[in-house]
Image (cartoon, helix red, strand yellow):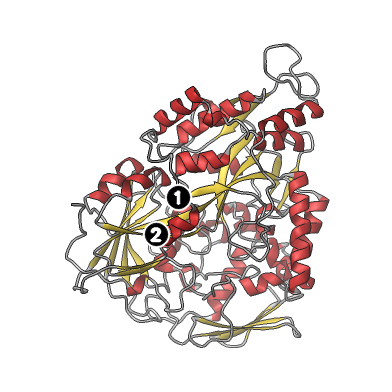
């Protein structure tokens, strides 16, 4: 058994004391299956529904939300989560995350013709904006025209023009200014259209090659492309075809949603949603006293406390999420919409990246800091995608002795006898780590990373000597701030398992800016029509994992379980990704006048 820095007496005690986890409850962690069995995704609370006008939602965050309320073009995860259950819902997905096809019950009836390389849309006549006007094919076409417009991309620093969309006929010519329209978007009528593609790839079936939500074209009329992100349609009164629309905003603090009377499933049962931001330090007290009905973003650091309360129910599900250790390895070329990798970057050596990953005990971190709700990432593919995930793989183990050997072999040696390694040229090496602030675990975790790297002879320090606020962190990471060498980040996975949107050369989400010919080749195979064959797809994903593990654009660290805290006055809740009953927030009902407090 390998000795963990986290398992070493004084270091462990110090870290647990700092994190507030030293009460013994975190030491015994249930297995993931036990947690999911005890806290299933579906909640059914006792009591009969009563007429209550307001659903109270607490959004746990230590940063103000940015307030770009476009389900297509939001730039912050906070904004995305705030809108998700109220304003989204253009497409329906099944349990395998694939689009539900050929159904008149969904907002958009999607038909895929592999022989003709066509995707056909037929809009449900009940699919309407909150002002009662129908969602039209003009809205869909306008969404693509904004998304792929070079001026918009440059002004908004938007990563939404995903390489997976290059299969749409004419979209690259439009992006490059060679055409005023996207030739592959064929409008048949206000309610029907076709998307002509070069080939039907696997991503089409997941919705990965097409937009997942739409803008309201009329609300953006006359607004220049480089001003759209500042428009009222995104910032003040964004149109919605979801169960609710935004009727009031206190910037960074509060959002009020009103029921959409034209929602295609029928008017929601609750008239108003009042969502307010709650600092993480106040979340436990708020849950205990029944301050809100539903809590979004409750941290795993308070799991052991909130599970003791009798006024709430908890739902869990595997998360479309992966945390990773990122490396600053290049820059982003706005004019070419591509990553430019610097082969001479400090973090370009795979041996150094691998050693940093091997030094971290993600299993113990998951147990001690996250109460078993997080677990080590063992593959470049999330276990959520069981079809392509290999449970026998353990590509990123904890092995500090191996880390030391790798560094020795790569020439990272202590040449001046101070206990810290120099780079292969014998020059001083200091690794600058960027981490976000927030929650009780961030500070002790940052200190653990620095200590773990010190144990293998690597000198490291926090950027600016402190943790960085969420919005500032991602702003600096996206612009490849040269003061950052390594950053601890995470991303929400799309329903399409194809990783091109994260590590592709033309992906703005590839924040480390690493790309290579071998990686691009592996990603293109995954994205090819040949991958529609399940056997070929497995072969290509296996090849991708091999290239990823050799080159390490990032080091995946952890996957997790999501959980949702729901007050017991909420009659029913379903936290599943896809539900045959069609549950969404329009169906929520309450059983008392006010949220219930713990007794």
Residue 440, quarter of the rendered image: top left
Where is residue 507? Give x, y as percent: 67, 54
Query: Does residue 485 appear anywhere in the picture?
Result: yes
Residue behind mark 1: 30
Question: Is residue 161 toward the left or the right of residue 94 in the image?
Answer: right
How many marks do you count on the picture? 2
Residue ranking furthest to the front: 1
Image quadrant in which you'd find residue 416: top right
Asked whether the beta carbons under mark 2 and mark 1 sit within 8 Å of each other, the answer is yes
- Left or right, 399 with respect to 229, comes to right
Task: Determine which residue is flagged by label 2.
Answer: 38
Query: Label for residue 94?
Result: none
Mark 2 or mark 1: name the one nearer the start of the chain: 1
For this orientation, the residue located farthest to the top is 417
Mark 2 to mark 1 CA distance (whole Å): 10 Å
Q: In this view, does 238 lie above or below 401?
A: below
């Amino acid at each position: 058994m390998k000795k963990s820095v986290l398992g070493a007496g004084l270091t462990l005690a110090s870290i647990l004391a700092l994190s507030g986890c030293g009460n013994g409850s975190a030491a015994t962690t249930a297995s993931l299956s036990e947690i999911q069995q005890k806290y299933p995704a579906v909640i059914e609370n006792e009591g009969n529904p009563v007429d209550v006008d307001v659903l109270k939602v607490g959004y746990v965050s230590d940063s103000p939300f940015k307030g770009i309320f476009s389900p297509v073009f939001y730039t912050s995860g906070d904004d995305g989560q705030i809108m998700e259950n109220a304003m989204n819902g253009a497409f329906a997905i099944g349990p395998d995350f694939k689009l539900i096809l050929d159904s008149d019950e969904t907002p958009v009836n999607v038909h895929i013709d592999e022989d003709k390389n066509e995707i056909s849309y037929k809009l449900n006549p009940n699919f309407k904006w909150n002002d009662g006007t129908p969602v039209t094919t003009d809205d869909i076409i306008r969404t693509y025209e904004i998304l792929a417009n070079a001026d918009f991309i440059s002004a908004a620093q938007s990563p939404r023009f995903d390489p997976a969309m290059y299969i749409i006929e004419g979209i690259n010519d439009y992006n490059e200014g060679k055409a005023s329209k996207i030739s592959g978007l064929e409008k048949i009528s206000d309610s029907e259209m076709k998307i002509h593609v070069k080939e039907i790839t696997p991503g089409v079936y997941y919705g990965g090659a097409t937009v997942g939500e739409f803008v309201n074209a009329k609300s953006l009329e006359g607004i220049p492309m480089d001003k759209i992100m500042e428009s009222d349609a995104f910032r003040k009164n964004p149109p919605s075809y979801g169960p609710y629309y935004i009727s009031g905003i206190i910037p960074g603090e509060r959002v009020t949603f009103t029921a959409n009377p034209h929602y295609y499933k029928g008017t929601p049962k609750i008239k108003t949603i009042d969502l307010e931001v709650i600092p993480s330090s106040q979340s436990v007290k708020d849950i205990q006293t029944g301050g809100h009905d539903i809590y979004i973003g409750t941290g795993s650091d308070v799991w052991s406390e909130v599970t003791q309360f009798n006024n709430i129910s908890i739902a869990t599900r595997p998360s479309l999420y992966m945390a990773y250790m990122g490396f600053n390895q290049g820059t982003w070329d706005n004019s070419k919409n591509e990553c430019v990798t610097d082969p001479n970057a400090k973090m370009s050596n795979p041996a150094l990246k691998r050693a940093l990953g091997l030094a971290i005990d993600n299993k113990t971190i998951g147990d001690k800091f996250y109460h078993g709700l997080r677990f080590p990432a063992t593959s470049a593919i999330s276990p959520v995608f069981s079809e392509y995930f290999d449970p026998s793989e353990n590509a990123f183990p904890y092995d500090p002795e191996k880390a030391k050997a790798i560094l020795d072999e790569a020439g990272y040696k202590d040449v001046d006898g101070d206990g810290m390694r120099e780079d292969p040229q014998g020059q001083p090496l200091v690794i600058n780590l960027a981490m976000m602030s927030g929650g009780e675990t961030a500070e002790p975790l940052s200190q653990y990373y620095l200590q773990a790297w010190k144990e293998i002879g690597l000198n490291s320090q926090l950027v600016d000597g402190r943790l960085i606020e969420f919005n500032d962190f991602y702003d600096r990471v996206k612009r490849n701030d040269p003061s950052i060498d390594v950053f601890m980040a995470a991303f929400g996975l799309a329903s399409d398992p194809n990783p091109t949107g994260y590590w592709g050369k033309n992906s703005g989400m590839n924040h480390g800016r690493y790309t290579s010919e071998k990686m691009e080749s592996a990603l293109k195979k995954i994205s090819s029509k040949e991958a529609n064959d399940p056997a070929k797809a497995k072969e290509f994903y296996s090849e991708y994992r091999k290239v990823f593990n050799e080159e390490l654009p990032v080091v995946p660290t952890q996957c997790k379980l999501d959980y949702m805290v729901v007050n017991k006055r909420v009659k029913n809740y379903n936290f599943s990704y896809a539900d045959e009953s069609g549950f969404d927030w329009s169906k929520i009902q309450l059983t008392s006048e006010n949220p219930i407090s713990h007794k």
